[in-house]
Image (cartoon, rainbow, N blue to C red):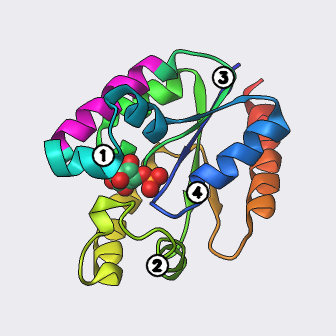
Amino acid sequence: MKDNIALIGFMGAGKTAVGKLLAKESGKTYIELDALIEERDGKSIADIFKLKGEKAFRQLEIDIIKETAGKYNQVIACGGGAVLNRINTDRLKQNGVIVYLEANAEAIYKRTSRYPGKRPLLNVADRMTEIEKLLRERTPLYEDAADITVDTSDLNIREVTARIMEELERYEGHHK
Ligand code: S3P
């Protein structure tokens, strides 16, 4: 049985908040890849982007996913760009079910307004246009990697978590 649950999806899709609750409800360990990267590198994500660039960040992300994907019984909240490197989702699938938290541009815009400066890729003059552009580029990658998809646009954290638990039961039922 695959016993990790990897949450993928765009910035602001709810991966962190849902991941924490889902871990509690399912008795798994909560792991946030961005937090591990920050710990490992001793810098915030924003500083890594600023000082080393996105390419260096993506390599740190690949390294940390390689280490994490082989461990057990975890809910893994991925950064929104983890799907950009196919090797990441291949590794996460080895011992995990991939859950795609979908969200529309309006929901993402609203949710990412809360912590300005936290997300270097959205630190631009026209955030909505950037969100729409990145969503267009990434949606096929999220869809391709997903075992289960939940649209979070009109749901709260509890509702999304409950939906994932239901979908997992159905999914695992098919794979036992
Ligand atoms: C990124 C998403 C961020 C973080 C980094 C890059 C992305 O994580 O990994 O800023 O490329 O979408 P969240 O999705 O948790 O904001």
Question: How far from the left and from the top, in percent, is residue 167?
Answer: 76, 48
Q: Residue at (40%, 21%) from the top-left corner?
A: 66
Q: Which residues make up the magenta segment?
A: 55-67
Displayed quadrant of residue 52 = top left
Asked if residue 79 lies in the magenta stretch, the reply is: no
- The answer to the question of whether label 3 and label 1 lie on touching residues, with beta carbons closer than 8 A, is no
Disc 1 versus disc 4: distance between alpha carbons?
16 Å
Q: Which residue is mark 1?
A: 84
Tell whether 61 sits left or right of 73: left
Amino acid residing under circle 4: Leu
Q: Is mark 1 within 8 Å of ligand 1?
A: yes
What crowding class fits label 2: few (fewer than 14 Cα within 10 Å), some (14-19), or many (20 or more)? many
Comparing labels 4 and 3, the label whose residue is closer to the camera: 4
Residue 70: mark: none
- The answer to the question of whether label 3 and label 2 lie on touching residues, with beta carbons closer than 8 A, is no
Q: Earlier in the sequence, mark 1 or mark 4?
A: 1
Q: Is residue 94 above or below residue 138?
A: above
Disc 3 versus disc 1: distance between alpha carbons?
23 Å
For the question of whether residue 143 can be seen, the reply is no
Q: Which residue is mark 3?
A: 2
Amino acid residing under circle 2: Tyr
Secondary element at tag 4 = strand
Amino acid residing under circle 1: Leu
Residue closest to the eye, 70 or 97? 70
Q: Earlier in the sequence, mark 4 or mark 3?
A: 3
Q: Which residue is mark 4?
A: 101
Asked if residue 61 lies in the magenta stretch, the reply is: yes
What crowding class fits label 1: few (fewer than 14 Cα within 10 Å), some (14-19), or many (20 or more)? some
Q: Is mark 4 within 8 Å of ligand 1?
A: no
Q: Main secondary structure of the magenta part?
A: helix
Question: How far from the left and from the top, in percent, is residue 31?
Answer: 59, 33
Q: Earlier in the sequence, mark 2 or mark 1?
A: 1
